[in-house]
Image (cartoon, rainbow, N blue to C red):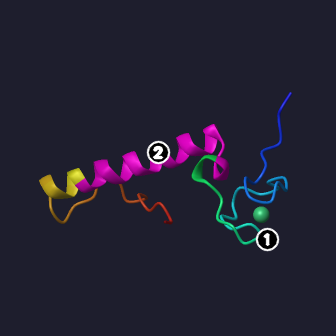
Amino acid sequence: MESQPKRPKCGSPVYSRRHPVCGRCGEKLPESLMFSAEARKKVEGVIEQDRKRAEWERKFPGTSPSDSGTTGL
Ligand SMILES: [Zn+2]
């Protein structure tokens, strides 16, 4: 059974974790409520990829490990 996360300030259920600001009270959501564990992993993966690419570019300036390396962020 999955418990519905609630906003700490106004107590209304969190319908969408994509919107960082509550539509009811305007309070910003804590990060822990914004992403599920799965989404968090995905984000961490993107950050890791970014770091690896930065490392690569430091070693081999002007080149890219892959041509389709855009993250869209
Ligand atoms: Zn609220």
User: Which residue is found at the position 77% from the left and 70% from the top?
Assistant: 25
| Spatial separation of the CA atoms under disc 1 and disc 2 | 27 Å
Residue 48 x, y percent position in the rendering: 38, 45
Q: Secondary structure at mark 2?
A: helix
Q: Where in the image, quadrant-wise, is ligand 1 located?
A: bottom right
Q: Which residue is mark 2?
A: 44
Residue kind at label 2, given as amino acid type: Glu
Q: Is residue 65 visible?
A: no
Which sits earlier in the primary sequence, circle 1 or circle 2? Answer: 1
The secondary structure that most of the magenta stretch takes on is helix
Is label 1 in contact with label 2 (beta carbons under 8 Å)?
A: no
Which part of the image, by quadrant, shows the N terminus?
A: top right
Residue 56 x, y percent position in the rendering: 22, 51
Q: Is residue 7 visible?
A: yes
Label tally: 2
User: Which is more toward the observer, 42 or 33?
Assistant: 33
Does the closest atom of ligand 1 sit within 8 Å of the Cβ of label 1?
yes
Q: Which residues fall within the magenta stretch?
A: 33-54
Residue kind at label 1, given as amino acid type: Gly
Q: Splitting the image into 4 quarters, where does residue 66 fall?
A: bottom left
Taking 25 as reference, is 39 left or right?
left
Q: Secondary structure at mark 1?
A: loop
User: Which is more toward the observer, 49 or 68?
Assistant: 49
Q: Which residue is mark 1?
A: 23
User: Which residue is found at the position 29% from the left and 48% from the top?
Assistant: 52
52 within the magenta span: yes
Residue 50 x, y percent position in the rendering: 36, 54
User: Which is more toward the observer, 39 or 70?
Assistant: 39
71 within the magenta span: no
